[in-house]
Image: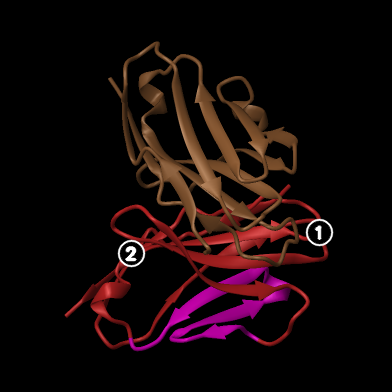
Chain colours: A red, B brown
Amino acid sequence: AQKVTQTQTSISVVEKTTVTMDCVYETRDSSYFLFWYKQTASGEIVFLIRQDSYKKENATVGHYSLNFQKPKSSIGLIITATQIEDSAVYFCAMRNYNQGKLIFGQGTKLSIKP
Amino acid sequence: DTTVKQNPRYKLARVGKPVNLICSQTMNHDTMYWYQKKPNQAPKLLLFYYDKILNREADTFEKFQSSRPNNSFCSLYIGSAGLEYSAMYLCASSSSQGNTEVFFGKGTRLTVV
């Protein structure tokens, strides 16, 4: 069965610094896809970045990057040069290759302080 | 247009009454999902359609119904709302290929009183 776990309930950092959010997952499939989403203050869920399990290179999009450690079943999200508007709840999610389900972790609330 | 549209954005319902939520997408996605989101919890998958095939999660099997009369449209139906159904309901769609993004609507906030 699939499972996604985010152990950090909340994180607070000062603006313009780098933050890392942790996520570990469980799956029996050899091919799968990992995602990070952000929930805005209005409740909207917004896609940020994706990592394919068969790719060794860490994905990077803008000031988001991933730390993919396959042997540890870990997919950390790194946000560099954080801004106040990065304050949100961040969700890690996983989807197996042959299954439509997208399963979420519990979320990490990120607060960026001036 | 990469949007998923949900109506209404806010819904007030009485205990014991039915609730019908509506979702549409114009991306020709073969898969559409419904999630329930409560504060401080992960979005919980309720059910999803792959084409015309409905897949319901085991623990919510009897609580929610859905229909998908065409590729673009999907509804979520609650036959008799209880207080515990108060939540944000998120509709999403995607291609069935696992590496594709899942697009979410802005949600319908349901309050049951």
The residue beneath circle 2 is A88
Q: Position of residue A79 (x, y in %)?
A: 42, 81
Mark 1 and mark 2: Cα distance apart in space = 31 Å
Q: Amino acid at mark 2?
A: Ala
Chain at numbered mark 2: A
Question: Can you tell which mark lies on residue A74?
Answer: none
**Residue A4: in magenta span:** no
> Residue at image x 44%, y 16%?
B18
Name the image quarter holding the C terminus of chain A: bottom left
Q: Amino acid at mark 1?
A: Asp
Residue B105 visible (yes or no): yes
The residue beneath circle 1 is A29
Residue A110 visible (yes or no): no
> Residue at image x 42%, y 18%?
B81
> Residue at image x 27%, y 19%?
B113
Q: Position of residue A27 (x, y in %)?
A: 74, 57
Q: Position of residue B10 (x, y in %)?
A: 31, 37
Q: Secondary structure at mark 1?
A: loop
Give, as a single range, the part of the protein colored magenta: A58-81
